[in-house]
Image: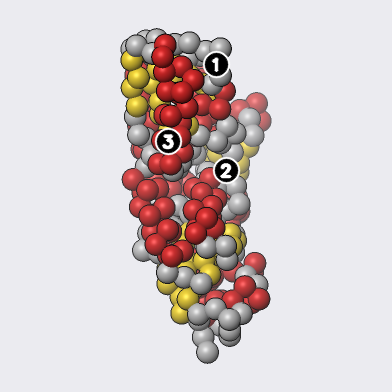
Amino acid sequence: MGLRVTVALHAGFCFGVKRAVKIAFDAAGDGPEEPIYTLGPLIHNPQVVKKLEEMGIKPVDSLDMLKEGRLIIRSHGVPPQVLEDARKRGIKVTDATCPFVKKAQQKVAELVDEGFYVFIVGDKLHPEVQALLGYGKGRAFLLDDLDQGMSFPKVGIVCQTTQSRENLTRGIMKVLRVIGGKLEELRIHNTICESTLIRQKECMALAQASDVVIVVGGKNSANTTRLAEISRAILEDTYHIEGAEELDPQWFRGKCRVGVTAGASTPDWIIGEVVERIKLIRR
């Protein structure tokens, strides 16, 4: 007997990623007339990055590796200093930063301009968070770096767009616990992307209604990893994979209901391959 597979309604590309990928593919066209690069992977999906490389769009780790051509700013954004440096070097810039990430960047800049110190709830090494810190002009910090020795009269809080509401709430409580008594003003901006919240809610419902959950997406994708964490907290039989070849038939022995969801940087064709492979498995 086959398995019953349910795919989350909003699995796969979000608006920002879809926009960034379209910008990149349009730039490549039938073959770019000039070298095209991205500073780091355009999105956190190895299959898409590989396909773009085959079309002539190559990720680089540093502007020092470029002497000419066009630079596409990835969906996670970059610090403003990088944009300025690229233009000084004469590199053409195409900005594919997600509009919701742009909004978070603007909130950091506005808070700093109004005299606030800003704490960012997010993953320290994530490129989006590094970009947000850059907009803080030396007055933005990671929430993880908050300690008892800090004292600021005006504090703002923003969030990496792919964080969970629970993490944002914990961040607010930490600020209040550590320096609350010294605060004159606290301003909070919930910059979590609505698309992220919808996917997280769907993931919770999927885990509650399934025997096994498969989360599809890059292992370096923060939002995909978050979906796997959310599902695993409800259902131990949750597996994070990048492609159909990673599926193990043993995961489905004695199971009936399989839920499938995917991160915001996972293309539909990869989700489709996973679903088709699951349907061929006999329990």
Label 1: which secondary element: loop
Q: Are marks 2 and 1 in contact (CB under 8 Å)?
A: no
Tell me the tag on residue 168: 3
The residue that label 2 is drawn on is 41
Q: Nearer the viewer, mark 1 or mark 3?
A: 1
Query: Earlier along the polypeptide chain: callout 2 or callout 1?
Result: 2
Query: Which residue does the image show at 46% across and 79% down from the upper left?
Result: 4
Q: CA distance from mark 2 to mark 3?
A: 26 Å
Q: How many residues crowd mark 2 within 10 Å: few (<14), some (14–19), many (20+)?
A: many
Residue 67 image offset from top left, x and y in percent: 62, 28
From the viewer's perspective, is residue 280 above or below residue 228?
Answer: below
Neighbor class of circle 3 (other Cα within 10 Å; few <14, some 14-19, many 20+) is many
Tag in front: 2 or 3: 3
Q: Which quadrant holds the C terminus?
A: bottom right
The answer to whether residue 112 is visible is: no
Task: Report the residue marked by disc 1.
Answer: 148
In terms of sequence position, does the residue under pointer 1 or pointer 3 come before the other? 1
Residue 257, percent from left and from top: 47, 76
Alpha carbon distance from label 1 to label 3: 19 Å
- Looking at the picture, how far across and down is residue 217, in whole percent? 54, 56
In the depicted structure, whether residue 25 falls above or below residue 278: above
The type of residue carrying mark 3 is: Leu
Element under disc 2: loop
Q: Disc 2 residue type?
A: Pro
